[in-house]
Image: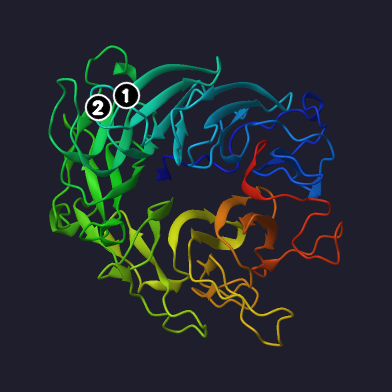
């Protein structure tokens, strides 16, 4: 099982160092969204083997570069620049990874939080929930040629917010914030999940098929043969009724949602279909047949989960739930993590799961901090192993003493570190101890890179 919106951390061939302008064989791109003093907005390059910043000029990528994604062939990196304000540039840039330059860019009609790239690296699908449309309420999927750097088509879906692409790239699932109906003579069934067949866009008048029966869906993960999609329903946290994971049979026409209960094969044998309820879910990661789901339980419109088992001044927390997709059953008691809206998750080396959120409960100590003062932000690290890692016991959680929203997570292949962008800064975590890495290039500041100044948002490795 592989999440549709995540790229394999170690797949793809590495580019030859001689083809890179910087000459760095294994690079990480880091988006900086402010210009101040000597720091300028753009894409910074870091040596992902030595944790040293490249001193060359940052790559231009709009006024406020933020979210990034690397194409499957590793040839390009797409970057969105936009602040969700009226004066934002909403620029979608295509960075040539070999020349380390902005090869082309397209102006989007609004802000996006979700885009996916086709398996052949030629096309980007971008969800723009507030894109103005003539025949219906605002919202559309903008289809962009990554090679040509141009808009090639539009699929109108009201308030479309998130996208997931099947492993084979032949089905695109689109999720809306509220159940909506299509205009222009298309199927008027209100739904919050739509199925798009990319090969039919531009040929069929109504390429989006509404699939009702989901509860505030946000994302989906596909079985290896793409026969089943596992849809993450946000439920209460997003204004719905019940968080869950619900199957969608992709072999029928139209695709069929699984029932409200779990149904298995003869004698209860997997694979099972249906709906598995969970306490909360806004972000998920699939490893093999295991799905890790993070979210914050809500009751009466406010966070309601106590921080049971943690010594903290925070009064509410989030939960991590582990689900077996084969049997559609929760395999352990939910694990307490930091709260907030969880939208970042990544598996690091040594089985360490990094979970990030935004707008969490922060504990900021007075300055200078007294001895033993708590510092707490939006990052949690869960030890998925059955053995201890450093001071973290098996199935234990550590909350690093750092403040701020987590906006970028990147495990570095072939190494034991994870790059984390939190509160606008890049930190490097050693997964053997789940704390900041000792960097000999900056020995007085563990987990930091010397001379790296800016307000950073996202980080991606581009060579492995």
- Residue 327 in view (yes/no): no
Q: Is residue 169 above or below residue 372?
A: above
Residue 308 lies left or right of residue 26; in this view the side is: left
Label 2 crowd (10 A; few <14 / some 14-19 / many >=20):
many
Mark number for residue 289?
none
Residue positioned 56% across, 17% down in the render: 147
Q: Residue furthest front?
A: 87
Residue closer to the observer: 435 or 2: 435
Taking 375 as reference, is 368 left or right?
right
> Where does the image place residue 266, in percent across and percent down from the top left?
14, 53
Q: Quadrant of the N terminus?
A: top left
Q: Nearer the viewer, residue 215 or 58?
A: 58
**Is disc 1 surrounded by few (<14), some (14 to 19) or many (20+) residues within 10 Å?**
many
Q: Is residue 249 above or below residue 369?
A: above
Q: In which quarter of the view is residue 12 placed?
A: top right
Residue placed farthest to the top in the image?
203
Residue 366 visible in image: yes
Residue 355 at x, y = what percent? 51, 61
The quadrant of the rendering that contains the C terminus is top right
- Residue at the spot 37% in from the left edge and 28% down from the top edge: 141
| Mark 2, secondary structure of its residue | strand
- The residue drawn where x is 24% and y is 35% is 250
Q: Quadrant of residue 219?
A: top left
* Foreground disc of the pair 2, 1: 1
Residue 294 spot, x, y in % from top left: 41, 61
Q: Is residue 114 above or below residue 109?
A: below
- Disc 1 target residue: 155
User: Mark 2 to mark 1: distance in Å?
Assistant: 7 Å
Please tell me whether mark 1 sits on a helix, a strand or a loop: strand
Instruction: List the residue tagged with mark 2.
Output: 208
> Which residue is found at the position 63% from the left and 54% from the top?
421
Front-most of 34 and 309? 34
């Amino acid at each position: 099982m592989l999440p549709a919106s995540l790229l394999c951390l170690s797949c793809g061939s590495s580019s030859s160092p001689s083809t890179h302008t910087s000459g760095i064989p294994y690079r990480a791109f880091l988006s900086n969204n402010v210009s101040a003093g000597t720091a300028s907005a753009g894409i910074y390059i870091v040596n992902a083997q030595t944790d040293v910043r490249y001193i060359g000029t940052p790559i231009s990528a709009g006024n406020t570069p933020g979210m990034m994604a690397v194409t499957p062939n590793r040839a390009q990196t797409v970057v969105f620049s936009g602040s969700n304000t009226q004066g934002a540039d909403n620029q979608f840039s295509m960075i040539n990874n070999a020349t380390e330059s902005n090869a082309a860019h397209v102006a989007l009609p609004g802000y996006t939080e979700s885009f996916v790239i086709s398996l052949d690296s030629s096309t980007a699908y971008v969800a723009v929930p507030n894109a103005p449309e003539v025949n219906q309420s605002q919202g559309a999927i903008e289809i962009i040629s990554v090679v040509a750097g141009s808009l090639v088509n539009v699929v109108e879906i009201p308030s479309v917010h998130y996208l997931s692409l099947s492993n084979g790239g032949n089905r695109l699932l689109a999720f809306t914030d509220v159940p909506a109906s299509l205009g222009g003579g298309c199927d008027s069934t209100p739904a919050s999940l739509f199925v798009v067949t990319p090969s039919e866009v531009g040929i069929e008048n109504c390429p989006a098929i509404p699939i009702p029966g989901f509860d505030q869906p946000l994302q989906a993960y596909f079985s290896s043969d793409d026969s089943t999609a596992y849809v993450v329903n946000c439920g209460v946290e997003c204004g719905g009724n019940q968080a869950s994971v619900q199957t969608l049979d992709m072999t029928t026409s139209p695709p069929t949602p699984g029932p409200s209960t779990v149904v298995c094969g003869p004698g209860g044998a997997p694979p099972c279909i249906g709906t598995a309820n969970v306490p909360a879910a806004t972000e998920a990661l699939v490893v093999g047949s295991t799905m890790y789901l993070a979210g914050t339980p809500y009751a009466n419109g406010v966070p309601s989960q106590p921080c049971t088992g943690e010594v903290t001044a925070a009064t509410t927390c989030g939960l991590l739930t582990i689900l077996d997709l084969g049997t559609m059953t929760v395999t352990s008691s939910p694990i307490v993590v930091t709260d907030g809206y969880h939208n970042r998750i990544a598996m690091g080396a040594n089985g360490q799961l990094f979970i990030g959120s935004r707008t969490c409960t922060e504990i900021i100590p007075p300055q200078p901090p007294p001895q033993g003062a708590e510092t707490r932000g939006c990052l949690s690290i869960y030890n998925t192993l059955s053995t201890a890692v450093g001071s973290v016991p098996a199935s234990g959680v550590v909350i690093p003493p750092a403040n701020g929203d987590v906006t970028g997570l990147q495990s570095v292949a072939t190494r034991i570190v994870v790059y984390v962008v939190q509160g606008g800064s890049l930190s490097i975590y050693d997964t053997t101890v789940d704390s900041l890495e000792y960097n000999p290039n900056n020995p007085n500041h563990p987990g930091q890179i010397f001379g790296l100044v800016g307000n950073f948002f996202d980080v991606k490795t581009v060579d492995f």
